[in-house]
Amino acid sequence: MKYDYILLDADGTLFDFDAAEANALKKSFYHFGISFQDNMLIKYHTINQMLWRKFEFDEITLKDLQRKRFEMLFDHIKVSFDTAEFHKYYAVQLADNAQLIDGAFEVCQQLCKKSKLAIVTNGISVTQNKRFYKSPLKELITAIFISEDIGYQKPQIEYFQFVFDALHINEKNKILIVGDSLSSDMQGGNNAKIDTCWYNPTSLKNETDIQIHYEISSLYDLLEIANE
């Protein structure tokens, strides 16, 4: 086994966040009696991604992100509503959705036989913990590291140093990070000086100077990499 430790991103890598997001948003709109249309989901997804990218670069706080994404969405659809109340309900619905990406369980089931697995995720602690412990992955993965708990987020080196210290990792050449985000996971791996594996199922182009050691379109490809 080439890697003693494999750090796995959560949303978009292990968990089907797009499905969870869509389900949670629709339920929240219906709960509060707000008419829902599919283009609202597309707009929310765009807003949410933009704000999370700002969070990665420490340009916005998590609390402001939670508030602002719904403020921007409601402003776009011309609805006046209490964003704090909406977020509270939405977060509960999101936490109840623990759908996995195809192959996530089976691949982790094989990887954990020879490597220690840990989840590294930017997110809200209550939501991410609940989704993790609702899933079958909890039996296979050693630990989950959530940015809200740590006080730093991917791609910050301080986030990764916390993870390394918690797992008592000394040899960085024995660590692989796997994730779908160039700016968060792959840049974080570069910052931390560990090998990177970009999960890229939609064949996006890497038009950055971020170094990618491996690129995969299916999680099953991880098994071949880990066994090199």
Image (tube, rainbow, N blue to C red):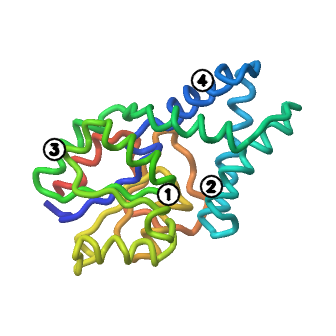
Tag 4: residue type? Answer: Lys
Which numbered disc, 1 or 3, marks the residue closer to the eye?
A: 1
Q: Earlier in the sequence, mark 1 or mark 4?
A: 4
Q: Quadrant of the N terminus?
A: bottom left
The picture quadrant where one finds residue 109 is top left
Label 4, residues with CA under 10 Å away: few <14, some 14-19, many ≥20: some
Q: Earlier in the sequence, mark 4 or mark 3?
A: 4
Q: Find the distance from the CA under tag 4 to the CA under tag 3.
A: 35 Å
Label 2, residues with CA under 10 Å away: few <14, some 14-19, many ≥20: many
Q: Residue at x 46, y 38 (%)?
A: 95
On the image, numbered disc 3 is attached to which residue? 110
Q: Give x and y (percent) for residue 195.
A: 34, 67
Q: Give x and y (percent) for residue 50.
A: 69, 52
Q: Are marks 2 and 3 in contact (CB under 8 Å)?
A: no
Q: Is residue 102 left or right of residue 227?
A: right
- Residue 27, which numbered label? 4
Tag 2: residue type? Answer: Trp
On the image, numbered disc 2 is attached to which residue? 52
| Front-lying residue, 145 or 6 | 145
Q: Secondary structure at mark 4?
A: helix
Q: Give x and y (percent) for residue 144.
A: 33, 56
Tag 3: residue type? Answer: Gln
Q: Is residue 212 above or below residue 46?
A: below
Q: Earlier in the sequence, mark 2 or mark 4?
A: 4
